[in-house]
Image (cartoon, helix red, strand yellow):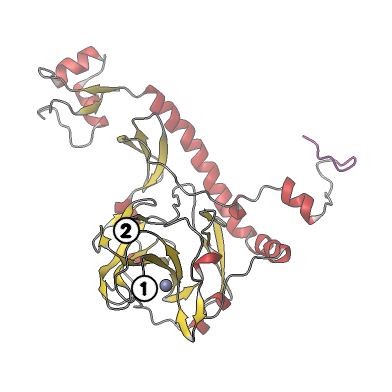
Amino acid sequence: MTLAVGHVCAQDTIKMSKKEAEIKIPRPHLMPVRSLMEDRGNVLDTIVTQSPGVKIILFDNNTWKYYRDPEVAQQQAVFTTNWNTEVPNPFRTSVSELPDKISIWVVDSLSSYRCPNPVKVYSRFGFRHRRRHQGVDLPLHTGDPVYAAFSGKVRMSRFNRGYGNLVVIRHENGLETFYAHLSKRNVEVGDWVEAGDVIGLGGSTGRSTGPHLHFETRYQGYAFDPEWLIDFEKGELRHRLFVLHRRYLSDNSRYVPETEDDEYEIHIGDEKAYAVADSIQAVREAEAERAAAEAAAAKYHKVRSGDTLYGLARKYGTSVNAICRLNSGLTATSTLRVGKTIRVR
Ligand SMILES: [Zn+2]
């Protein structure tokens, strides 16, 4: 493939404008991420992969996706350090101890994103009437579903005088998201949620003048304008890789659209993170091919009355042991439950 900039050999340095570069050099870490919109079918099966903690889920509508095993994910220190189920800010870090810029992968090939409430921001982050406002207000109707933006573990689910019914989710990358004024909380402390799970219903509990979702994003206990992360009107996540500047962690640092120079700076500064992510991606792609082949070869059987493991093994040309290996919890002496789907190949 040749680039349309004169006669250049592959070994030559290719000079192009920033604009051209933006088009020709793919920078997936800067690409916006669309909100999950619909539910994937029902889970049919999970397949383990060579990487510990990574599984593949097969759905009954013939789609599949990577899945981070919550059991493994939850063992990370981020879910035990400064873990407090009662106070909104359990951190004691001073903002001056934090680096100037912190690169945070918000969404990778194992995770997804759903906009908590895609709507024009009604009240922005920052001071209003001399009172600080540590999140954004997103109008909704009482009873509307509120979605978890990313996967994570519920750190708080309780009533608070100001926040009303509040759910706080801590994510693997250390970010926390707050969902306040809910009419109903659907999750409990310690629950693992996936992006798009309905964690509660919108309302007007606590210090609130009408139904809305007060949504906060925090790092080390410090709130920053969620609009740095999410374009609420479009419902999109702005970047996969979020570069959190320390100056954002201030009560009056409102989102301003990034200039082209800022974006370029982000690109240069994150070359390393990008390279690492790239190599991980390559491994996963190889894994995906294997999984797709395995998924294509997989066969399922819905248990009917009278079915036995021995009978199924004969019918599908396999062995009882092989079927047991494919279905966790199944042993040669298990009784088959009528209506249950088991994997036979
Ligand atoms: Zn608010």
**Tag 1: residue type?**
Thr
Q: Which numbered tag is attached to residue 74?
A: 2
Residue 63: horizontal and vertical position, in percent? 41, 32
Q: Which numbered tag is attached to residue 209?
A: 1
Mark 1 residue CB less than 8 A from any atom of ligand 1: no
- Is residue 276 rendered to the left or right of residue 195? right
**Tag 2: residue type?**
Gln
Under tag 2, what secondary structure? loop
Total tally of numbered discs in the picture: 2
Specify the quarter for ligand 1.
Answer: bottom left
Label 2: how many residues lie within 10 Å, few (<14), some (14-19) or many (20+)?
some
Task: Give the foreground label among 1 and 2.
Answer: 1
Residue 102: horizontal and vertical position, in percent? 55, 69
C-alpha span from label 1 to label 2: 37 Å
In the depicted view, which residue is nearer to us: 232 or 13?
232
Q: Which numbered tag is attached to residue 5?
A: none
